[in-house]
Amino acid sequence: MRIKSLYIPITIALSIPILGYSQVQNSESIVHASTKSDTKEKHISFAPNGYWRGIFKIKPELEIPFNFEIKDKEGVKKLYFRNAEESFEAGEVRQTADSIFVKIDQFDNELAFGINGNTLNGNLRKQNGSGRATQISAERKDYRFEPNGKAAAADYSGSYDVVFKSPDGKEEKTVGLFKQKGNKISGTFLRITGDSRYLEGIVEGNEFQLSGFIGSTPSYYKGKFESDGKLTGEILSARGSQPFTGVKNNNAALPDAYKLTYLKDGYKTLDFSLPDVNGKKISLKDDKYKNKVVVLTITGSWCPNCIDEATFIAPWHKENKKRGVEVIALHYERQTDAAYVKKALTNFRNRFGIEYDQVIAGKADKQAVAESLPALNSFLSFPTTIFIDKNGDVSKIHTGYNGPATGKFYDEFVKEFNSEIDDLLKK
């Protein structure tokens, strides 16, 4: 995803072979034990259920920890990524004699592990085998960062004005939100493009570490809190580091998200006719949407903040559609071939129980969005939410998404969202 979203793509310079008991090659090619009796014994002796601590081996001097749990759900083993208070369902666990596979359909990725005693060794890779794999190991441990026994120097909970500095010297203002209990800390960074979702970590002395992972690319932050309320730190990845500084401010906030994206002069609405996965063209002019309030979401199945939005809006739509409200999701995906897009949108629909229309709008690129929706002054973020009144005209546009990890900012968004819908229904 883009660097502004804090989900920094990780590229490994060389393909790293899987280490350990089994060399996992792909979901259909597995090195089995030499005899049937050995195979049966190894399969039965290894039970994957429980809590695990994984390590992404990005480069010799950079390892990023994450946590996951494997447990049974309705008779099926599933893997869940754990970040702060969130347990994020990744996918079904498929176990063979000497290997474990988990297809993370949300991001078109796959975890492939070889079983080595009570340790897992493997990698994160694309399901189609493209790109380069990232090496991972995992052990049965319930902590994230290895504690050194040093107590936290203070409670650093609160809101911070945080500025990230890009390699070209540009600065971006964000809001850092932290919650601390003892040595444990959780947090997120809120930008105009969205938040970095749930981050979890540790404070020792005045130094902190945070990481997060839900199946796309891992994120890792480290830094220091100073006694005067300031903080310094950096995001670390295979691409290098990005520094940030901050100062505590209980009133830290971003610019009004409803004033960043708007219609150009002379435009009142958005005019589009786009196909769903079955080729049916969808337009705001369709009878289904006449005299109704419509919410348009510019989204993508690959986008973590879009996942948070769908988690909110799918059940909201079910509850409110009887009031005369509809939703259309304009999907911009990383690949545009028909088979891939149908799979991605269908998985997205099934995961969140979506009952509103999804259309194929184009490639996941800001410029592509701007070109396909020329009425917009610009396009800044996936997702962007557009409110349409009963006459088919644009009422408001919200840039980005404040997910549940942002606490009060999420509550404010939900309140404003419902208030806007209520006002449009009365007109």
Image (cartoon, grey):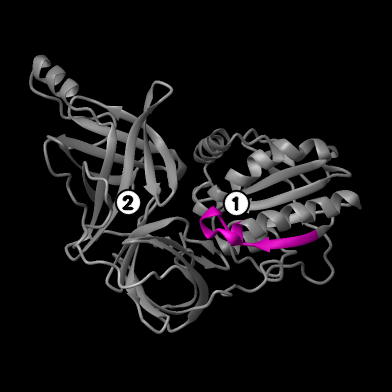
The one nearer the camera, 9 or 305, is: 305
**Residue 405 location (% of width, % of height):** 51, 56
Q: CA distance from mark 2 to mark 1?
A: 24 Å
**Residue 103 location (% of width, % of height):** 37, 36
Label 1 sits on a secondary structure element that is strand
Indicate whether 154 appears above or below 5.
Answer: below
Could you tell whether 15 is left or right of 380 in the image? left
Q: Which residue is mark 2?
A: 131
What amino acid is found at the position of numbered circle 2 in the picture?
Answer: Gly
**Residue 157 location (% of width, % of height):** 44, 67
Q: Which residue is mark 1?
A: 299
Q: Is residue 259 magenta?
A: no
Regarding residue 129, the answer to whether it shows in the image is no
Q: Residues within 10 Å of mark 2 (few under 14, many from 20)?
A: few
View extreme (top): residue: 37
Query: For the point 17% across and 44% down, which residue is it?
Result: 18
Q: For marks 2 and 1, give the one nearer the viewer.
A: 1
Q: Residues within 10 Å of mark 1 (few under 14, many from 20)?
A: many
Query: For the point 78% across and 48% down, which residue is it?
Result: 294
Where residue 46 sits, quadrant-wise, is top left
Indicate whether 275 appears above or below 49.
Answer: below
Could you tell whether 278 is left or right of 421 in the image? left
Where residue 350 sits, quadrant-wise, is top right
Q: Is residue 405 magenta?
A: yes
The one nearer the camera, 180 or 58, is: 180
Mark 2 or 1, nearer chain start: 2
Indicate whether 10 appears above or below 97.
Answer: below
Magenta segment boundaries in residue numbering? 395-410
Could you tell whether 171 is left or right of 112 in the image? right
What amino acid is found at the position of numbered circle 1 in the picture?
Answer: Thr
